């Protein structure tokens, strides 16, 4: 039996959970930029390999990278075009914006505590494209999607099982906690460092009866939208470098605020 960890030890919702008996193991290594190689064993569940959380997060801390967010280029080992990557973008509307809806037939949601993912949607300007998720992502199977535009920024969608930190079958973000608790718990997993003093704004919005927490953090510049549905927590993260943020702030905020469970 191996131990898997979802949150950093400093997180208010830090929790460990015993994984189910493994079907196989495969070696993996994470190399820090300018530092040593950190080895880890992948535990295969239903044919899907995932990195042991305790050692993965230790490696992340040593490398100074985020777990759920945006890994550095030194870790960008791509999977290529996988069968699970099904186009979900609409044609541009009259303002040049496209809507992405997670296809019902897209793969994902394997392992302990998983069930079919309730679809989500968001809007992006024309020119944003899906990016293959890196096999080096320490977020493992929780990172469901990445998009990027070289001139404007990047985004990721994290879909994590609620049962790893709370016994909820029909979760809402309010049941998980108030905005302050959610950003303190999950912000470090997204940006790779403590969020204390970095939260510039914290708002609550409601669409079709579902509550969304919306946060803006200072450098590293990022918008985080958090909600929950079924037995999953959703984190929608939109980020950019300083120049992109300054030039495209309004569009990046519009992207972040467009996230919906459908």
Image: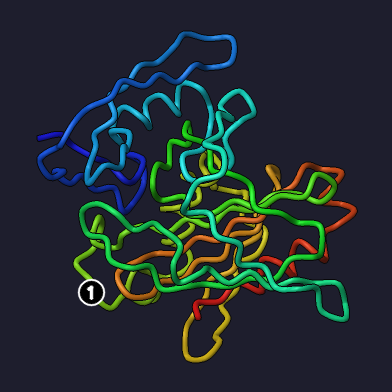
For residue 231, side relative to residue 77 (left or right): left
Residues 104 and 99: in front is 104
Give the SS element for disc 1. Answer: loop
In the image, residue 251 sits, relative to residue 77, either above or below, namely below
- Using the image, determine if residue 8 lies above or below residue 125: above
Residue at (80% x, 44% y) in the render = 150
Q: Quadrant of residue 72?
A: top right
Q: Which residue is mark 1?
A: 169
Q: Can you give x and y, in whole percent of width and height, for residue 110 in the image? A: 29, 54
166 or 21: nearer the eye?
21
Q: Is residue 94 left or right of residue 155?
A: right
Q: Position of residue 137 (x, y in %)?
A: 48, 36
Q: Quadrant of the N terminus?
A: top left
Tell me residue 62's x, y (percent): 46, 21
- The spot of residue 53 in percent (x, y) is 30, 36
Would residue 215 be found to the left or right of residue 4 on screen?
right
- The crowd level at tag 1 (other Cα within 10 Å; few <14, some 14-19, many 20+) is few
Residue at the (55%, 60%) spot, across then down: 86
Residue visible at 52% across and 47% down in the picture: 190
């Amino acid at each position: 039996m191996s131990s898997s960890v979802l949150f950093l030890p400093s997180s208010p919702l830090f929790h460990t959970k015993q994984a189910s008996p493994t079907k196989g193991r495969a070696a993996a290594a994470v190399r820090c930029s300018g530092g040593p190689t950190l080895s880890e064993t992948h535990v295969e569940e239903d044919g899907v390999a995932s990195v042991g959380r305790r050692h993965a997060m230790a490696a992340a801390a040593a490398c100074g990278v985020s777990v759920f967010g945006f890994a550095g280029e030194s870790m960008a080992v791509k999977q290529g075009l996988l069968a699970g990557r099904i186009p979900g973008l609409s044609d541009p509307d009259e303002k040049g914006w496209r809507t992405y809806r997670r296809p019902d037939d897209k793969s994902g949601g394997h392992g302990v505590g998983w069930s079919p993912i309730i679809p989500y949607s968001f809007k992006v300007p024309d020119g944003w494209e899906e990016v293959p998720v890196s096999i080096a992502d320490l977020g493992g199977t929780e990172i469901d999607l990445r998009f990027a535009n070289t001139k404007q920024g990047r985004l990721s969608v994290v879909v994590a099982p609620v049962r790893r930190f709370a016994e909820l079958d029909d979760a809402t973000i309010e049941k998980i906690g108030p905005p302050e608790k959610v950003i303190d718990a999950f912000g470090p997993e997204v940006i790779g460092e403590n969020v204390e003093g970095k939260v510039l704004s914290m708002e609550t919005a409601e669409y079709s009866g579902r509550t969304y927490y919306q946060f803006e953090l200072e450098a590293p510049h990022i918008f985080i939208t958090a909600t929950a549905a079924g037995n999953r927590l959703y984190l929608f993260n939109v980020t950019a470098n300083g120049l992109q943020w300054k030039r495209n702030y309004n569009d990046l905020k519009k992207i972040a605020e467009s996230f919906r469970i459908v």
